Amino acid sequence: MTPPTAAVTETVRQPLIPPSTHPYADVIHRLEAGGSMLPDTPENLMQIIGIYKAYAVPMDFYWRDLLYIAERVFLNPLPAFKYFISQDYLDLPNSYAGEQSKLRIWRGGEKAHPELLEFMAKGETGKLPKLLHHLWHDRINMEFAEACMQAMLWHQNMGGRFNDYLASDAYRANADRAIKAYFRGNPLMLGLYRLFPEMFMEQVKQMSYYANLGLFWEVMAPVFFEMSDIYDEGGFKGVPDAMDFLVNGIFAVAGRPIYHHVYINGECIEIIPKSEGFTWLYEAALPYVEAVFYRTAPFRGTKSYNAQAYQVPAEQADFHYGILYADVFPVGSAGIPPTLLMQDMLHFLPPYLVDLYKNHKRGEADQLIQLGITFQRSMYNVTSAVIQALRGALLYPLDDTDPEHLLANRRFFEAQMDRFLRPEARLPQVQTQDYR
Amino acid sequence: MANIIETAKGAGCFGTLLTAVEVAGLTGALEGPGPFTVFAPVDDAFAALPPGTVQTLVDNPPQLGRILKFHVLSGAYSREVLVTQPEWESLEGAPVAIRRADPFEVKNATVVSADIVCDNGIVHVIDRVILPG
């Protein structure tokens, strides 16, 4: 016997605008439905959350050491110990974790993460003096963080007012005060400063980018830790949930000040004061995404590029060497920045990712490549969050009923996808699960 | 006639905006001679932002001030004048785009009440907080 059928009252809503004809129309329609560039599959969710956790632990070192260098090491001409972060900076309370935080993003503590401290003590080789760990490279690869900072420094004009400010009289006056204070009683360095003032200015600008990136990542580490904890509790239903968490996080901290303070002989010199009004979103996050996810620069030693044969774009804006375009296999060569990061993440993989990699491709033998591709997937999700956050901030809700508004959203999404039309983009690959 | 701040207080739907203006130290300026054009988001516009957004700004007055200044133009401009130009420079420095004349839209916000004339300028009430970019 068939059960009585209830009257079907479902109404079929006509779409207010025609479908996109863009080559990435499927992805665009998914974004318009509140999704991510990364398809919503349980494995994608597992991969991205697992790698966020593995990324957050070294990131907890990166942001602390970036601030340590910007604020304390500063212009040390022989900064051999700049990666030997002080205890004060390992204990520096994260502004978004711990009881003291005004806006608590991560439920955990405010000091350096326990897994980070454990790794710093033992590394892979066991308990040895710090110097030996450093020289043997059995440590957090801080060079990766510096490569990201240099990408931001080099690409410079990527929106926001930060870079313009570095050329202002106010900045130069503050930097001059800091340089003179730092080298007080050092006639050699002060003499060199008189001879080559711009060289010193450039170094201070670089230090300001150290501070910028440190303040940016101070936020991202607790965001990723919290996402991992939520996932472990079974809290995210799919990739869009994970993306929405990031979108909300971007808004929540958008107004965080970006500044550069330096401490010299107990005195704090404000090279970029908070009162300049620079914000996390405009002066750090958006330039970071542009410089690091999209652009960066060709990595030395991976491939030869012939600039005269136009293998390197003439315009910096066309650079496409970031993670969203990376061919992880050749990029995974020893010593170059992305590989350094992969090596750092390898130490903190959650067990479920270790198991996943064992069961695919070459198992443990190519874990670095597999986790690099996972990282690529996860950064397509972070980029999706940035795209959705910008759409939310500058355009219209996804459920808007005005067709003109929906078309404006459509044009925005299509323009974003245009950036992945070049053949190096990995957007098509991350649509399938067999890309590993 | 009342000034911009007095007008906003009288309207009863700008509690968050008035608090923000106070915290950012801009109340005095908006009570001054101006004249200004203010795109004033209603309380619901602030409430629609994800949790923490407003709090972070309120905790950091210079950053809050920057966002608020994006809602202010130097000079008093009515809707009729504003729609003659695609964008106007805000006090923050970034341009404010006039996207549509009818319905009257400023960036991604819709003007729900235009041309409220005050002693020291003109207020246009908007339904979303607008952001530079």
Image (cartoon, coloured by chain):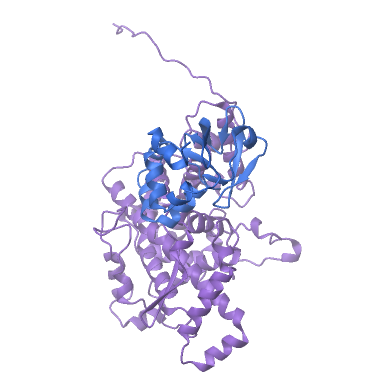
Residue A196 screen position, x and y as percent: 61, 84
Q: Is residue A436 visible?
A: no
Q: How many marks?
A: 0
The one of A276 and A216 positioned closer to us in this rendering: A276
Up-down relation of residue B115 to residue A242 (above or below)? above
Q: Is residue A340 left or right of residue A116?
A: right
Up-down relation of residue A256 to residue B71 (above or below)? below
Up-down relation of residue A358 to residue B113 (above or below)? below
The one of B90 and A190 positioned closer to us in this rendering: B90
Residue B112 screen position, x and y as percent: 50, 29
Residue farthest along the left direction in this orientation: A99
The one of B37 and A297 positioned closer to us in this rendering: B37
Q: Which chain is blue?
A: B
Work out which quarter of the rendered image holds the N terminus of chain A and state it: top left
Residue A262 screen position, x and y as percent: 43, 75
Residue A424 screen position, x and y as percent: 61, 52
Q: Quadrant of residue A95?
A: bottom left
Residue farthest along the right direction in this orientation: A308
Residue drawn at x 49%, y 73% is: A207
Residue drawn at x 36%, y 64% is: A60
Residue farthest along the front direction in this orientation: B1
Q: Which chain is purple?
A: A
Q: Is residue A421 visible?
A: yes
